[in-house]
Image (spheres, rainbow, N blue to C red):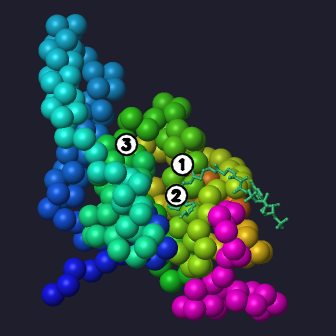
Amino acid sequence: MTEQTFNYFDLPIGESPEPTPVSEQRRELARELLAISEQLVRLDADESALADYTAQARALREQLESHGHRSMRDILGRLITGQGSRQDALDMAEFEILSGPASPLSPPMTLWLDGDTVRGSATFGRVFMGPPGKVHGGVLALALDMLMAKTQDFVTGLGMTGTLNIRYLAPTPLNTEIRFEARLNRLEGRKLFVEAKVFAGDTQTVEATGIWVSARGDYRLRDRFAHLAPADQPA
Ligand SMILES: CCCCC/C=C\C/C=C\C/C=C\C/C=C\CCCC(=O)SCCNC(=O)CCNC(=O)[C@H](O)C(C)(C)COP(=O)(O)OP(=O)(O)OC[C@H]1O[C@@H](n2cnc3c(N)ncnc32)[C@H](O)[C@@H]1OP(=O)(O)O
């Protein structure tokens, strides 16, 4: 059986293919590192215990440094020509700051398509705190950026965030499942207009609108999402 190959422009944003054994292990390592970070917040340990932990952390960092990194340039080169391996596709998604399961900075936030809606879910621990007991607004902005970028799964074309407007309606609690949803509002040439909401339980805590700008060429709805075009707008 020939190995499946992956194309950069067909990769779903913020979702990973089935993990390889290496990626499974990277995820476990990242979970441990995030759990360590959670422990460090206001850790009530004395100076000598902290010096001991610092030495252990330094020893681990030095071991990690001996391995080097898979080259982003090579990975992108293979993916852009449609010749990416599963590990290449995993490496593109696994380290996204908030949604990558192998990112030690991610809760992780999970992202998926549900019909015409992009959905997300995350539970933020104390490392993500802004106001006491609440999620930092900048962290929610990052989560929204990732969530809303995923509306590009509905279209051909890929671009960066041009504008992101956020209105914080109510504080968002830590250690609570937070739900996110985003929808395509409309396409206009190289611009994609997106809206999003954040919920804690039944309470909407944030609303957002944004514009994504395609790197090259106009955005077009993919065939299976052609129904997302308003009646007066050709797909
Ligand atoms: C093989 C390479 C593929 C390249 C892929 C590119 C991106 C991939 C990104 C993500 C995909 C993957 C997963 C997601 C993961 C992470 C998400 C990361 C999200 C970010 O972290 S992302 C960084 C923050 N982001 C920036 O760092 C943008 C800096 N900025 C620029 O790089 C330029 O500023 C740009 C490109 C935005 C526009 O420049 P430009 O020269 O290409 O476009 P131009 O000026 O011609 O405007 C054309 C039409 O867009 C309108 N327009 C222009 N700028 C606008 C804006 N800001 N807001 C709203 N509308 C805008 C005009 O008004 C005109 O509209 P009209 O046609 O109607 O007149």
Camera-nearest residue between 147 and 154 = 154
Q: Which residue is mark 3?
A: 105
Q: Earlier in the sequence, mark 2 or mark 3?
A: 3
Residue 141 horizontal side relative to residue 43, left or right:
right
- Residue at 25 percent across and 41 percent down: it is 68
Task: Count residues near mark 2 (Cα–Cα under 10 Å), then give few for <14, some for 14-19, many for 20+.
Answer: many
Relative to residue 215, is residue 50 depicted above or below? above
Relative to residue 22, is residue 50 depicted above or below? above
Asked whether mark 1 and ligand 1 are closer than 8 Å, the reply comes as no
Q: Which residues are magenta?
A: 212-235
* CB contact under 8 Å: marks 1 and 2: yes
Q: Which residue is mark 1?
A: 142
Residue 85 horizontal side relative to residue 213, left or right:
left
Relative to residue 2, is residue 102 depicted above or below? above
Calculate the distance from the C-alpha at mark 1 to the C-alpha at mark 2: 6 Å
218 magenta-colored: yes
Give the SS element for disc 3: loop
- Whether residue 203 is visible to the viewer of this picture, yes or no, is no
Calculate the distance from the C-alpha at mark 1 to the C-alpha at mark 3: 12 Å
- Expressed as whole percent of the image width and height from the top left, the position of residue 120 reads 46, 64
Give the SS element for disc 1: helix
Residue 146 has which mark? 2
User: Label 2 is placed on what type of residue?
Assistant: Met
Q: Earlier in the sequence, mark 1 or mark 3?
A: 3
Give the SS element for disc 2: helix
Task: Count residues near mark 1 (Cα–Cα under 10 Å), then give few for <14, some for 14-19, many for 20+.
Answer: few
Asked whether mark 2 and ligand 1 are closer than 8 Å, the reply comes as yes
